[in-house]
């Protein structure tokens, strides 16, 4: 990590600190609504899932999905505003900073925000008695990886569009299906075989599986396959946002 990347990251963290309370409060509301409606409401009509209560089943998924939404919104609406409206990227490039440095700073900041939001929801879930293993302390560390993946995916899309309204398509047609079909609300094993195979292309599915295993202390060698998929996606896609954002800046 270069000094230029750290400078970009420091700038974002400075702004984030000014709105920390507002951001954290917002990050709590939606997961709590889902936990209340699905866990206490629907959960009272659902039998045990994989040997656990429905609340216990979905709680780790809420941690994983909260982290996903944090990275996604930061590198879609947040990055789009900095690129097209606030011209923050242009201002940064006036300093000895490259497009790669700017993009790396965006991704790292989204990953940090992902950890913060995920950790807050994890603390709430733990307070509700839905964490049953000290292995859950590793969840914030693990969230770095999906945070990078979702930040990169979001920047790829953001770097491909010119109008802010197009971001709605990304959220509705891409992120929302990932959220609904990720194993957060029902076991992946309940899906047809072909759909279970497709789940392996869903980064949130891998995130949910690892978070649930850590929260419940159900560790198994197979978890490394989920970590490996996230790592491979990060490596394969990392350079693409730089190319796309570069085109936006010179067009």
Image (tube, rainbow, N blue to C red):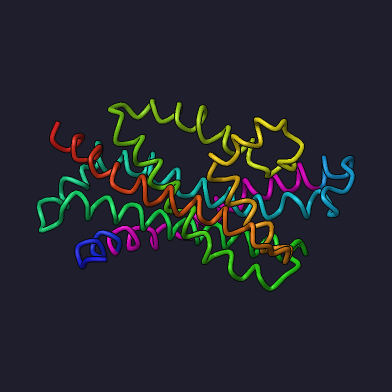
Q: Which of 97 and 237 is in front in this view?
A: 237
Seen from the viewer's position, the closer of residues 104 and 172 is 104
Nearer the observer, 60 or 222: 222
Residue 25 x %, y %: 56, 55
Q: Is residue 228 magenta?
A: no
| Residue found 13% across the figure and 50% down from its top | 93
At which x and y percent is residue 209?
Answer: 65, 52
User: Which residue is at the front of the view, 89 or 101?
Assistant: 101
| Residue at the (22%, 66%) spot, across then down | 2
Image side of residue 56 versus residue 171, left or right: right
State whether residue 165 is above or below residue 92.
above
Farthest-out residue, bottom: 134
Please tell me whether residue 117 is drawn above or below residue 79 in the rendered image.
below
Residue 20 on the magenta segment: yes
Image quadrant occupied by the N terminus: bottom left
Main structural element of the magenta stretch: helix, strand or loop? helix
Which region of the structure is painted magenta?
A: 10-39
Numbered marks: total: 0
Tell me which residue sits at (62%, 36%) in the image: 197
33, above or below 116, in the image? above
Residue 147 location in percent, x, y? 46, 53
* Horizontal side of residue 110 vs 246, given as left or right: right
Residue 217 position within the rendered picture, expressed as x and y whole percent measured from the top left: 72, 66
Rendered view: 130 above or below 54: below
Query: Which quarter of the image is occupied by the C terminus?
Result: top left
**Apparent side of residue 56 relative to residue 195 in the rendered image (left or right):** right
- Residue pictured at 32% horizontal, 63% vertical: 14
């Amino acid at each position: 990590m270069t000094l230029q990347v750290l400078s970009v990251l420091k700038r974002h963290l400075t702004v984030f600190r000014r709105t920390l309370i507002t951001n954290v409060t917002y990050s709590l509301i939606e997961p709590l609504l889902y936990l209340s409606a699905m866990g206490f409401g629907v959960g009272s009509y659902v039998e045990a899932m994989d040997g656990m209560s429905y609340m216990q089943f979905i709680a780790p998924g809420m941690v994983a999905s909260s982290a996903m939404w944090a990275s996604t919104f930061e590198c879609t609406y947040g990055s789009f505003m900095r690129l097209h409206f606030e011209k923050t990227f242009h201002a940064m490039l006036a300093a000895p900073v490259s497009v790669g440095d700017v993009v790396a700073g965006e991704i790292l900041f989204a990953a940090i925000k992902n950890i913060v939001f995920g950790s807050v929801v994890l603390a709430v879930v733990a307070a509700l008695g839905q964490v049953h293993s000290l292995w859950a302390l590793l969840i914030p560390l693990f969230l770095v990886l999906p945070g990078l993946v979702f930040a990169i995916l979001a920047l790829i899309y953001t770097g491909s569009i010119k109008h802010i309204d197009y971001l709605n398509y990304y959220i509705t047609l891409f992120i929302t299906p990932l959220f609904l079909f990720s194993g957060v609300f029902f076991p992946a094993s309940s899906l047809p075989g072909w759909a279970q195979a497709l789940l392996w292309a869903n980064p949130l599915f891998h995130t949910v599986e690892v978070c649930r295993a850590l929260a419940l202390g159900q560790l198994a060698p197979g978890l490394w396959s989920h970590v490996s998929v996230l790592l491979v996606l990060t490596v394969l896609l990392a350079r693409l946002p730089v190319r796309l954002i570069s085109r936006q800046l010179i067009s």
